[in-house]
Image (spheres, rainbow, N blue to C red):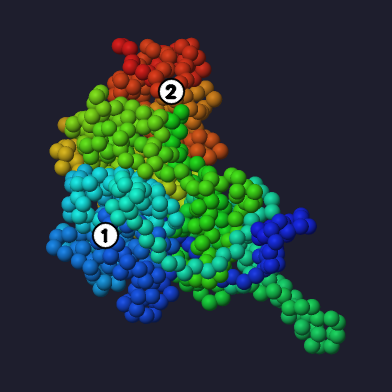
Amino acid sequence: MAGSGMVFWKPGTIAPGSLVDRVPSSSSSTSLASDGRDAVAGGSIAAVYNPNSRLAIAEQRSRLPIAAVRSNILHMLEQYQVLIVVGETGSGKTTQIPQYLHEAGWTAGDRVVACTQPRRVAATSVATRTAEEMGETVGDLVGYSIRFDDVTTPGKTKIKFMTDGLLLREMMATPLLNQYSVIMLDEAHERTIATELLLGLLRKVLRKRPEMRVIVSSATLDAEAFRSHFNLNTDASDPSKDTAAILTVPGRTFPVDVQYLSQPTPDYIKAAVDAVMNIHTEEPAGDVLVFLTGQDEIERAITLLNDRVDALLVDAAAAKRRYQQQQQQHHHGDRGRLAAPPASYMNMRVLPLHGALPFQEQLAAFEAPPRGTRKVVISTNVAEASVTIDGIAYVVDSCHVKLMVYRPDAGHESLMIVPISRASAQQRAGRAGRTRPGKALRLCTESDYCTLLPERSVPEIQRVELAPVLLQLKALGIDNLLHFDFLSPPVTETVARALELLFALGALESNGRLAIPLGIRMAELPIPVMQAKMLLASAELGCSEEIVTIAAMLQVQNLFSSSASNRDASGSDFAASGNAVVDAARSRFGVTEGDHLTLLNVYLAYSQHGVGQHGDKWCGRMNLNPRAMQRAVQIRHQLMRYLTKFGVAIESAFGKHRSRNSQSRNPSDDEATAAAQTIRRCIAAGYFANAARLKPDGSYRSLRYDLDLAIHPSSVLYYQVTQKLHRPLPPPKYVVFHEIVQTTRTFMRDITAIEPEWLLELAPHFYQKPAMQAVGPSSSSVEPGSVSASLLGETWMDNFAVSRKKPRAL
């Protein structure tokens, strides 16, 4: 158990199987048998290790690396419109620069300093820390604003942390951002879509507001691209006219030993567990950070690791007993050779860290372990730059990441596991060298690292679906997208597909301009465009009360829990399959119409039984996460405010179909069926572009792009069709779905059964009945006879097909 047989090697030493040093080096070959200590962790949280926590706050601030360049920052901001600050995580950029600006008078009068973060929890936690340093309460002088949660006081808040997406939304109301004197774009190297748009928009704002200042903060050395983007000096021979400059914050890192696998691994999760066990049994005390791609992988690794540690401790205890027996025999006259004492091992505490964890559970990863315990934190990629934790010693890097990727040929986004960039790998390795010399173990060969990993990650704007991005730009009055100042221009085909979808949803007119009022309202709603259309369509269909609930429930994660204490980390909207407790919980609320109405059922049951003093106990019995449900209630209230602002009447589909003569509190079966049909029609009004139909083999094919799809195991329809929890029911012939998940197969997730006639009624510009050919934006086409015979096998729907160009009249 002590060794797993994994072999790592250090570049510059004798490679495994080789007799010759590849690169001369004075150091000896280093496997996993040298020094080391603690670990790193991360999630959607901006926690930073503070080695000076016992000192007064003023002394703590003075010891941060950023303090050495405080005067430089303030001086350069007087000289340049834009300052790019490059400094490693933990240098103090995020918390200190806004305070420096406040102290220097940039918040005098009614002026405010804004600092954007790519993640919600980063904005809240950094605001909390900054307020603490300033002796303030969050929401007064220092506040934060994130989606569905604004903790600021108008006229009083002077330092405002917010997500980059929130600043974009503020620009819709005040395009020149007149309330801000300085805007700091933090973690700009992550190149999120919102940051990418802000980089272009702020370049325009600076031309109108030369007195405003922009700070771009980055943890990597790609600052020149940012400087070139903002520098308005057209005379290269005269640097005095430059409008942007770069400032580098001195670092305080320790050396990190980087090692690679000698052979490629077919299972990096098992390889990560093996590597952690090697560290645990062979290396000195110290914590470990493991980078995996998502919750499911993290949970699998935690299970494997706990099993391995339990077996190790059992074996160690047995060996200790045998040794004690030998000692007793030796003491009583047995003069045989006494064996060496058995190895003793530390305890291990394994913790997950990812964005879907509740805040308090995220914080557990940053707490010091008990004496004699090694902490192992298994995290997603959010630990690359947002966190710094005490005693980091070992990093185990899967060299993979899960990213949302848009496929124009398929017309859908899907989560895909891909190799990380070499820049990201360097960031991850650096987590092991923050407080002492460390060691990074990359679960790939050096050859694969050099040949398969790209130098830098593809900016998000070049790999995701762009409909919400373009809708926001249109709402900001930017109609000529080709001339927008993108730092990295998006893919032309992706832009075309996004414009097509927005037109189909009714957000754009035929001339490409924003539709009024629908387009403006869709842009203002802080939810995806299809959900926004669904929510606004509910006013006309008379089911806004139910649809606003469904929209709110779609925003929460970690809904079902596999334990009564609700501390399970699994799942997103619905926890992954394979857990009998979660399956039973899902079945308890499930309906034959699909997942969206199941979400409605969950909320209605919670509103009756889950609120109040005993709400958490009820959620525990139902295996629901009470925090997720409370969040859904808050989001629903926010969305209701938008509907009120838009003048949308709040009407219930159940009330609409209720008989005037009915004396019962509960609707009849006919009334409930009619109400459910209205709700499903409204869902189809938003998701009609994500429609699929049943094939004879039980799988589905998307109507728009002929993509083969399967029902995701987390769907209630999966269990109804597979007879896992119910007697078998026939699968619905037509469905709409919320998203696609790409794993071993291409799955639909969050599915609702629909009638095909609704597509013709709700989206006649998108679908047509008599035309069998599929033409238009896709280069592929379907032969007239090939669709009907092979997909459904029902003669009455033989001629139902997708129109990929302007449909012919019915």
Give the mark nearest the N terminus, 1 or 2.
1
Furthest residue toward bottom: 332
Q: Which residue is found at the position 60% from the left and 49% from the top?
A: 449
Residue 501 sits above or below residue 274 on the image: above
Which marked residue is nearer to the observer: mark 1 or mark 2? 1
Residue denoted by label 1: 79
- The part of the image, by quadrant, that contains residue 385 is bottom left
Q: Which residue is found at the position 30% from the left and 30% from the top?
A: 502
Residue 810 appears in the figure: yes
Residue denoted by label 2: 778
Q: Secondary structure at mark 2?
A: loop
Q: Which residue is found at the position 50% from the left and 71% from the top?
A: 435
Give amino acid for label 2: Ser
Say whether residue 529 is left or right of residue 642: right
Specify the quadrant that holds the N terminus: bottom right
Counting from the top left corner in percent of width and height, residue 303 is at 57, 57
Give amino acid for label 1: Gln
Q: Secondary structure at mark 1?
A: helix
Q: Which residue is found at the position 50% from the left and 38% from the top?
A: 742
